Image: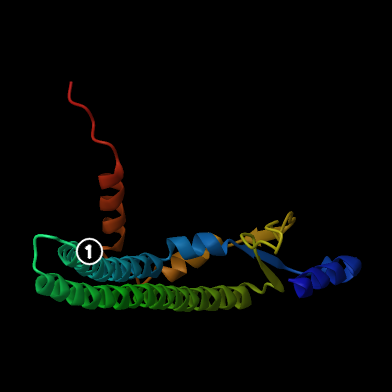
Amino acid sequence: MRFITALITVLVATSATAADLKVGVVDMTKAFTEYYKTKDASSKMKSNKDKAMTEMNERFATYKTLLNDVQKKQKESQDPILTQEGRAKSGAEFQEKLKEARALEQEINEFQQRRSMQLKQEEMQLQKGLYDEIVAVVKDKSKTAGYDLVFDKSGVSMTTVPVLLYYKDATEFTDEVIVDLNKNAPADSGKKDEDKKSDERPAKKSK
């Protein structure tokens, strides 16, 4: 970020040279959002997260059943109606069930942390791959159009302030990038988006 700021400062200082520069602007966030592969990646990540949630729910169900057994055995170990031998047996079973419950609780916590990290890494890798493809298209179009500099208008600094606050005489070609990215999209890709939007629209009330 400091490098970009320094570069802009140098360019402004050398106005004679800067006047000859051809500058382009791209909205990388928009390009990423409207890239058809992003929608596919989102569907894949949702499927992975749903699968992880199912696995967690199964473990929680087992844990809940085990806790019920723990409470049952604890109650039996203190039941005056049972013989001393019966209470002792229930007490031993209570300790065993309690041990199992604690082990399962630890296993659930470790599984949750492991799966969360795995899903996060998968999502980061998918996003990086998509951004690499978008950047490749941007670079190709920049070279073809003869741009000297291309900025991402959606980029923000460490203070969340947009890096590109104002630009003049710069050409934005985000839509061209999006068209190029989606030129090999499956024929039903657009139809799926329309169907999704249609499903999200509220149903009209019959008169």
- Return the x and y of residue 48 as percentages of the image width and height: 30, 71
**Quarter of the figure with residue 164:** bottom right
Residue 182 on image: x %, y %: 40, 67
Left or right: residue 142 versus residue 60 is right
- In the image, what residue occupies the spot 35% across and 76% down? 106
Quadrant in which the C terminus is drawn: top left
Nearer to us in this view, 145 or 31: 31
Please indicate whether residue 171 sits to the left or right of residue 192 in the image. Answer: right
Residue 96 seen in the figure? yes
Residue underneath mark 1? 64
Secondary structure of the residue carrying numbered label 1: helix
**What x and y, as percent, mark residue 11?**
84, 69
Q: In the rendered view, tell whether residue 161 sits above or below residue 152.
A: above
Q: Is residue 95 above or below residue 170?
A: below
Quarter placement of the N terminus: bottom right
Badge 1 crowding class, 10 Å Cα cut-off, few under 14, some 14 to 19, many 20 or more, is few
Confirm whether residue 186 shows in the render. no
